Image: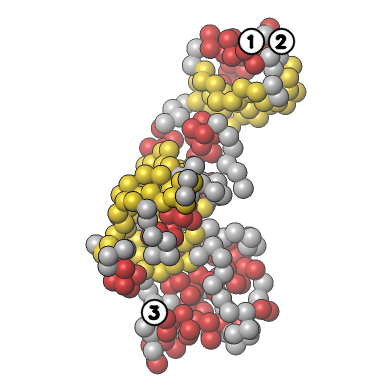
């Protein structure tokens, strides 16, 4: 498993990761969900030994990643956000190289190369140079390189960025298959639907901090039966705040001259009441979006903004 305790990473005066803690267990997919710049990739860099933590403790299968880094990385597989492939080499040559870096040799290396090529749907392109592959094929080969040595712990950093729908579906299936086989998987993403589909537990991260953590049901419960209303138009901010504060079960998320967002209990039934109150306060409502309880509405409620690309 992976154990992260009070992880902190700073660069001069800038804090990229601030007191992050979580555990990921064998056979589960633990998600780190957050926008670009939230601190996910920095956290992954510290787990994999590419970065040295400023403070805190990380262990992989009981091995400290700083003081016992060689053992910690021995059972660790990594699928980075940036493609770790040699464009002029074939798929087979890339896998033999990365397998060799993990200690695979001879017959075993060739056997595993054939297995992961078949698993990722690339067996018929095994001898072609990677520079001829589509983006989705490269992503699948990147995944194959991360699992060729059958790691007990697998860390994936935004593995589906920029892929076609078919490759995305297959990659998500491959991740789930790894967890089903008992692998401990840590999966970072900024796609809500991926987190909801894959993750047994997850932490929502923003500005380097964990702002919520738990199972999907536990996180959804934080919203209760609240819906999120997002209104665009013209809003006298102070007057709109005043009328919404008086309304029962309403919590303001964002109040700006052109944007008003708030969560409310039984919002669907209360739209006429709430709109009438806002209109009486001088609001001019031009567009309305309502979202039912989900990871996305929880994120907006906690941070006051939509998940950023």
- Residue that appears at 29% across and 59% down: 59
The residue identified by callout 2 is: 282
Q: Secondary structure at mark 3?
A: loop
Who's the residue at 62% across and 12% down the image?
238
Asked whether the viewer can see residue 259, the reply is yes
Q: CA distance from mark 2 to mark 1?
A: 8 Å
Label 3 and label 1: CA atoms lie apart by 63 Å
Quadrant of the image occupied by residue 253: top right
Q: Residue furthest bottom?
A: 106
Relative to 186, is 69 above or below? Answer: below
Contact (CB < 8 A) between labels 3 and 1?
A: no
Q: Position of residue 304 (x, y in %)?
A: 55, 31
SS of the residue at dot 2?
Answer: loop
The residue labelled by disc 3 is: 102
Determine the residue positioned at 31% across, 68% down: 69
**Colour theme:** secondary structure
Q: Of marks 2 and 1, which one's residue comes earlier in the chain? A: 1
Please state the horizontal and vertical placement of residue 89, each as a whole percent of the image: 59, 85
* Badge 1 element: helix
- Where 251 falls versus 180 (above or below)? above
Q: Are marks 2 and 1 in contact (CB under 8 Å)?
A: yes
Which one is nearer the viewer's eye here, 90 or 83? 83
Q: Is residue 187 above or below residue 113?
A: above
How many residues crowd around disc 1 within 10 Å: few (fewer than 14), some, or many (20 or more)? Answer: some
Q: Quadrant of the N terminus?
A: bottom left
For residue 149, side relative to residue 141 (left or right): left
Pick whichever of labels 3 and 2 is earlier in the sequence.
Answer: 3
Can residue 27 be seen? no
From the top left corner, tell me how far across and down residue 47 is, in percent: 38, 60
Residue for point 44% across, 35% down: 220
Badge 3 crowding class, 10 Å Cα cut-off, few under 14, some 14 to 19, many 20 or more, is: many
| Residue ID for mark 1 | 239
């Amino acid at each position: 498993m992976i154990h992260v305790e009070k992880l902190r990473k700073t660069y001069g005066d800038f804090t990229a990761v601030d007191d992050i803690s979580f555990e990921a267990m064998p056979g589960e997919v633990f998600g780190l969900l957050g926008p670009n710049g939230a601190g996910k990739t920095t956290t992954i860099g510290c787990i994999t030994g590419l970065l040295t933590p400023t403070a805190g403790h990380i262990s992989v299968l009981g091995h400290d990643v700083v003081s016992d880094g060689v053992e910690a990385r021995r059972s660790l597989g990594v699928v980075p956000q940036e493609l770790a492939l040699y464009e002029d080499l074939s798929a087979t040559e890339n896998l033999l190289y990365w397998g060799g870096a993990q200690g695979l040799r001879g017959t075993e290396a060739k056997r595993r190369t054939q297995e992961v090529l078949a698993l990722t749907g690339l067996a018929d392109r095994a001898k072609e140079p990677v520079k001829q592959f589509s983006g989705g094929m490269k992503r699948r080969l990147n995944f194959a390189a991360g699992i060729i040595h059958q790691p007990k712990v697998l860390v994936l950093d935004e593995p589906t960025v920029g892929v076609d729908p078919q490759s995305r579906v297959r990659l998500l299936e491959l991740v789930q298959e790894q967890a089903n086989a008992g692998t401990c998987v840590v999966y970072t993403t900024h796609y809500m639907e991926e987190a909801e589909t894959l993750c047994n537990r997850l932490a929502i991260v923003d500005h380097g901090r964990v702002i919520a953590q738990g199972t999907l049901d536990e996180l959804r419960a934080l919203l209760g039966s609240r819906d999120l209303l997002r209104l665009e138009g013209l809003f006298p901010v102070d007057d709109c705040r005043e009328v919404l504060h008086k309304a029962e079960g309403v919590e303001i998320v964002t109040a700006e001259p052109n944007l008003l967002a708030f969560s409310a209990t039984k919002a669907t039934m209360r739209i006429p009441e709430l709109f009438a109150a806002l209109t009486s306060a001088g609001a001019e409502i031009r567009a309305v979006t309502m979202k039912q309880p989900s990871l996305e509405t929880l994120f907006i409620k906690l941070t006051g903004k939509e998940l950023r690309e």
